Image: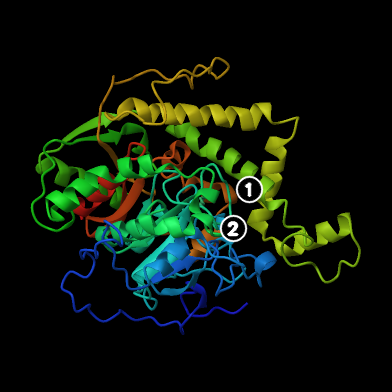
Amino acid sequence: PKAKTSLNAFISTEEPVRVAIPPPHPNPNPAIVPVPPGLSEWVSVVSSMAVKDNIVTSKHRTTCGSRFLENHLSPFEAHVVEQARRFSVPISGKTNLDEFGMGSHSTNSYFGSVTNINLNPHRAPARSAGGSSGGSAVAVASGQCTVALGTDTGGSVRLPAAYTKTIGFKPSYGLLSRWGVIPYANSLDTVGILASKPSQILNTLSILRPHGKHNLVSSSAKTNPTRDPTLLSKQFWDRAMRQLRDQLFSQQYAALLPGEINFSKLRIGVPMEYNIAELEPAVRSAWQRALEVLQNNGATVVPISLPSTKHALSAYYIIAPAEAASNLSKYDGVRYGSRSSSADGAGDVLYSMTRGEGFGEEVKRRILLGSYTLSSEAIDNYFIKAQKIRRLVQRDFDRVFGVQNPLRPPQQFDLSDIDDSVQLRDKLGPAEVDFIVCPTAPTLPPSLSDVLQQTPVDTYMNDVFTVPASLAGLPSISIPITGNKQVAGIQIIGQYSDDARVITMASRLM
Ligand code: GLN
């Protein structure tokens, strides 16, 4: 398949692909305008939106970056897309991704690798745009859309944001409807938002809101958001947005506009385990810079310990492939996906040829991994252990946040068969932090040629800082911070359903 542009960000578009910055909006602050009464109590102007190609749309194909779905046209639209249309947001096109969201550099697509825009193509080697929502990140970074939807299962919105100097927000698990999002790993999948300004993230979130009045219309329609069984109730949405709404209405958007910064009541946790030897100096100095800004503006910065972090990556790479193997079993050329033209009969040959041709290398690797860890021989040692690690990761976070996790009262888990070294003690006592601030990725974007040399495990290691928040379902945002003249992605992680404060923090730190 041919690349559409040198960046290869889009798989299909409604208009010809352009690499241009849209003209300035006549409204001096186009990102935030009061909404006409009755439409929504939220703010919403987003001039164009690109959509990752694993979120279904009825006007474009939805390929998931896979040969299997090369010609797949969905009969319906995802809830989030329907919401965008309801608010008259033009959809610029469908963006390139790692096949089914599996990857960290957007190089695992049947439609070719995405190239990062942020570097001079004549001077520097082509760099990774991060993955798997690399197309969405490049579409934003190159000005081809105002915001882009991605999906974040283990970092796929935050990592591309970090590599392209954009902002990537992963909401609390269950906050946005996954109806119409082709699943990779259901217990981790979230719809995320990429943009250049925190206010655009907020506007988009308000547009995508699954519980607004405007949604009553769709309650009997195909895109009823509650068809996502993990969608949180309206109560949770209100809880997640409460603080922001207060700010929007009582302080005239102050929190989201540049100006006064006041961090004096905040406690920021710095996880010691994230300060690994492999951290690139530029990333460390951006991290330091973010902490200095916070401290200089009155925040209390405290070291915290998240000891299960070192096991989070292994747990993630057991849970995600296991769920993926299960999800992808439906692509057999009979029920779903294109059928191999050389397979003429039913049964094993048809399945194996179809699946052999339809899936790329990485997807096959995940199917094998997942099928193995779910097998009767291995499930206890892998899948069940990984679920327990996941609980430990969640517990680590719950212990350091000052706000209690609304889903989990102080926890009681039977973790007796987990190794002692993993049984964690409070190293530092209750930290009661508001947010955790840490890097999004250990390095700046590697060159695409280096990425091709990496082993799959090397690539998995890149997700070490993003998967913990995914396993715990926490809201997290990656923002570009300059330290020592280079820009690195820094992550702000909040307690479950503290989404609004996480975005507000991002707006104040930028
Ligand atoms: N890189 C991770 C993976 O390959 C995360 C991908 C994602 O969040 N979709 O699984």
Q: Is 293 in front, or is 213? A: 213
**According to the image, label 1 marks what residue?**
324
Residue 143 visible? The answer is: yes
Relative horizontal placement of residue 343, taking residue 30 as reference (left or right): right
Relative horizontal placement of residue 418, taking residue 267 as reference (left or right): right
Going from N to C along the chain, the mark reached first, 1 or 2, is 2
Work out how far the residue at label 1 is from the one at label 2, CA to CA, in angstroms: 9 Å
**According to the image, label 2 marks what residue?**
100
Q: Amino acid at mark 2?
A: Phe
What is the residue that sits farthest to the bottom in this orientation? 16
Examine the image and state in which quarter residue 377 appears. top right
Q: Is 249 in front, or is 24? A: 249
Q: Position of residue 478 (x, y in %)?
A: 33, 52
What mark, if any, has residue 428 been given in the picture?
none
Q: For the residue labelled by badge 2, is the local secondary structure a helix, a strand or a loop?
A: helix
Q: Residues within 10 Å of mark 2 (few under 14, many from 20)?
A: many
CB contact under 8 Å: marks 1 and 2: yes
Q: How many marks?
A: 2
Q: Residue at x 79, y 61 (%)?
A: 334
Quadrant in which the C terminus appears: bottom left
Q: Position of residue 259 (x, y in %)?
A: 9, 56
Q: Residues within 10 Å of mark 1 (few under 14, many from 20)?
A: many
Q: Is 37 in front, or is 487? A: 37
Q: Amino acid at mark 1?
A: Ala
Q: Is residue 226 above or below residue 20?
A: above
